[in-house]
Amino acid sequence: MSRQASGPLAGLRILEIYGIGPAPFCGMLMADLGADVVLVDRAEMGPEDMDLGRHAVTNRGKRSIALDLKTPEGVATVLQLVENCDALIEGMRPGVMERLGLGPDVCLARNPKLVYGRMTGWGQAGPLAQAAGHDLNYIALSGALWYSGQPGEAPMTPPSLVGDMGGGAMYLALGLLAGVMHARATGRGQVVDAAIVDGSANMMNLLMGLRSAGLFASERGKSLLDGPHWYRSYRCKDGGFVTVGAAEPKFHRLLVEKLGLAGDPAYANQGNPKTWPQRHQAFAELFATRTRDEWCLLLEGTDACFAPVLDPDEAAVHPHMAERGIYSCIDGVLQANPAPRFSHTPGSAGTVPRRGQHQQEVLQDWLNVEVP
């Protein structure tokens, strides 16, 4: 029973070894866009394994088989599947796949066109390669966390988007697609070493250019995007929050006008860092005088560069988000729909498989093996 799929990656076969965080997120991105992603689940979940069941959104659209990779039979089945796929995703600590007998040398010997994607925090080599860590640690070391906070305060702990998803999964996805293009042109596969420290550092390059040009300070709270009153979040009267990002002078003038501050000389020199703390305090006091909805009525949709801070449930029903269909509720789980959008080959969000649900189907489809 062959899998029928649509999307720009239809026909691409990807084998994903069970993991957590950025590796399965990368697999979800591929499955959303039509790739046939087969997840090699664990035969049995251990006490420390995270089994989210139908809530495991990053497994949506994949097919699941369950194998014990500590047995010769499990390893042999994976190697057979490797012979029939374009790419492999694994997120183990360096050396684990080699010890299982599924390292890149073994797999590329079975399939020279294979693109072997490796997802780690520290990378496959380096003094920290074998150390445990998580998103916050990786972006701290890479420099990406530095600007997250104000002077004299500890950097804020962001959700695992900058590291795991941005610097990790997205770079692995790009690497896999680039590798597959090269393999199809040359017949030669390769290993993609996607490290969160690499990707999150690479994401800093816009700021590094601004910093080198003298437009972005080395000190937190004194740069164009982390210190000014016109690029901040503010608490409202009802406890909600709003954001303003009026960086350009024309947008700043409009924001000041909308706030009833036109003509106030304190706002004439937008780019003077010495005035920012006082203006921030003034903005904070002003925004606290109205509710979030009242500020939306005044500012949303204008060139004042404004948006309310919404939780996911609120975001899903916001008129702009709803009209674009950005969120869906699938099997009772709120989740964002595939991105980006394609005019001729749109992606689609599949359902989350049960562990081992597609065992017989995948073995018949990829290996022509009849399973009783």
Image: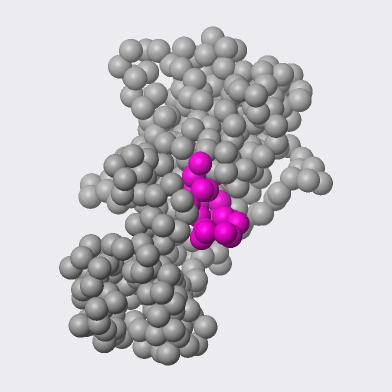
Q: Is residue 146 rendered magenta in the image?
A: yes
- Give the residues drawn in magenta, as a range: 143-165
Nearest to the observer: residue 127 or residue 130: 127
Counting from the top left corner in percent of width and height, residue 143 is at: 51, 41
Nearest to the observer: residue 159 or residue 204: 204
Instruction: Classify residue 290 by image quadrant.
Output: bottom left
Counting from the top left corner in percent of width and height, residue 133 is at: 67, 39
Instruction: Classify residue 22 by image quadrant.
Output: top right
Main SS, magenta region, reads loop
Nearest to the observer: residue 173 or residue 269: 269
* Quarter of the rendering occupied by the C terminus: top right
Q: Residue at x 28, y 45 (%)?
A: 345
280 displayed left or right of 146: left
Q: Residue at x 37, y 12 (%)?
A: 187
Q: Residue at x 57, y 43 (%)?
A: 140
Q: Is residue 87 above or below residue 303?
A: above
Count of numbered circles in the view: 0
Q: Is residue 53 rendered magenta in the image?
A: no
Q: Residue at x 25, y 82 (%)?
A: 264
Nearest to the observer: residue 366 or residue 156: 156
Q: Is residue 153 above or below residue 80?
A: below
Counting from the top left corner in percent of width and height, residue 49 is at: 74, 45
